[in-house]
Image (cartoon, grey):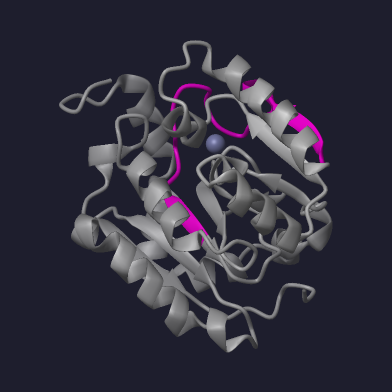
């Protein structure tokens, strides 16, 4: 796919999202969450399993950090992962963040898996590589229409919510940078790209912490607005305070 054409498969995936997009634009994300019966499952600390995973929309468990921290310096990665209390480092097929960190690798998936194994050993963590088959998206494209900017520290996407990247803002200090990266991928050639318009924008969904003032709706809003400036009205920012999560 290039920048002037959008391929048939991408359009087919896009069309599947139109109904939920319409719902969000007319009624807002809070209502969308409210209509899902088992929404508390989206805030289940058990699904974190102290595992660091990528922000990729195809991965629906863990604490989400771009490329599991591959873009950070080794020192900062050690510090961030230790502070988050993770015990497992994951890598995955088709990782955009890994491709940015290591642009000259030819067999990217193999190199990514190998990097994860070496890095996990250095950090004293276990390692797991997530294959394309295990991911909840097509192997060759990003079909996210949303980015969840999560400050509860417990969010993972469940069925019924729009496919979207997850940035675990509470757990890692690189949140704003990771949010910018997710936007770049979603608006790039591998994402829905130019299909996002001011009529059908990408949604940044803010999930503030219920009591921590440093992670309030206002704080998250400001961070998201700053990062989303280049996209204008092709990005819509919406959020709400939730008491659905079990506490963390
Ligand atoms: Zn990734």
**Picture residue at 28% right of the left edge, 53% below the top:** 200
Q: Residue furthest top?
A: 106
For the N terminus, give its image quadrant.
Answer: top left
Asked whether the viewer can see residue 206, the reply is yes
Q: Residue furthest front?
A: 75
**Picture residue at 36% right of the left edge, 35% below the top:** 191
Q: Is residue 146 magenta?
A: yes
Q: Which residues are magenta?
A: 125-148
Q: Is residue 5 magenta?
A: no
Q: Position of residue 206 (x, y in %)?
A: 49, 69
**Picture residue at 79% right of the left edge, 34% below the top:** 121
In the figure, residue 192 lies in which quadrant?
Answer: top left
In the figure, residue 16 lies in which quadrant?
Answer: top left
Asked whether the viewer can see residue 158, the reply is no
Q: Position of residue 99 (x, y in %)?
A: 46, 28
Q: Is residue 46 above or below residue 102?
A: below
- 161 or 179, nearer to the observer: 179
Tell me: 32 left or right of 229.
right
Q: Is residue 106 above or below residue 185?
A: above
**Picture residue at 37% right of the left edge, 37% below the top:** 15
Q: Position of residue 165 (x, y in %)?
A: 51, 48
- 86 or 75, nearer to the observer: 75
For the C terminus, give its image quadrant.
Answer: bottom right
- 86 or 151, nearer to the observer: 86
Q: Position of residue 136 (x, y in %)?
A: 61, 34
Tell me: 121 left or right of 234.
right
- 24 or 236, nearer to the observer: 236
Q: Is residue 241 above or below residue 49?
A: below
Q: Is residue 183 above or below residue 37?
A: above
Tell me: 209 left or right of 14.
right
> Where's ligand 1: which quadrant?
top right
């Amino acid at each position: 796919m290039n920048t002037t054409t959008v391929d048939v498969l991408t359009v087919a995936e896009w069309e599947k999202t139109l109904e939920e997009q319409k719902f969000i634009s007319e009624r807002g994300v809070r209502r969308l969450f409210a209509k899902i019966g088992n929404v508390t499952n989206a805030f289940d600390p058990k699904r974190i399993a102290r595992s660091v995973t990528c922000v990729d929309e195809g991965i629906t468990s863990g604490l989400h950090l771009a490329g599991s921290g591959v873009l950070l310096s080794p020192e900062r990665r050690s510090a961030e992962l230790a502070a988050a209390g993770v015990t497992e480092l994951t890598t995955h097929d088709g990782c955009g963040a890994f491709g940015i960190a290591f642009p000259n690798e030819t067999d990217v998936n193999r190199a990514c898996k190998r990097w994860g194994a070496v890095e996990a050993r250095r950090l004293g963590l276990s390692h797991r590589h997530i294959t394309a088959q295990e991911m909840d998206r097509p192997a060759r494209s990003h079909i996210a229409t949303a980015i969840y900017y999560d400050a509860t520290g417990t969010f993972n996407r469940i069925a019924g919510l729009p496919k979207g990247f997850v940035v675990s803002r509470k757990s890692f200090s690189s949140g704003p940078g990771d949010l910018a990266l997710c936007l770049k991928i979603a608006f790039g050639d591998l994402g829905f790209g130019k299909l996002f318009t001011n009529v059908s924008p990408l949604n940044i969904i803010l999930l503030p912490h219920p009591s921590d003032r440093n992670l309030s709706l206002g704080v998250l809003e400001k961070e998201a607005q700053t990062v989303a400036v280049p996209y204008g009205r092709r990005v819509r920012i919406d959020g709400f305070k939730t008491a659905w999560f079990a506490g963390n």
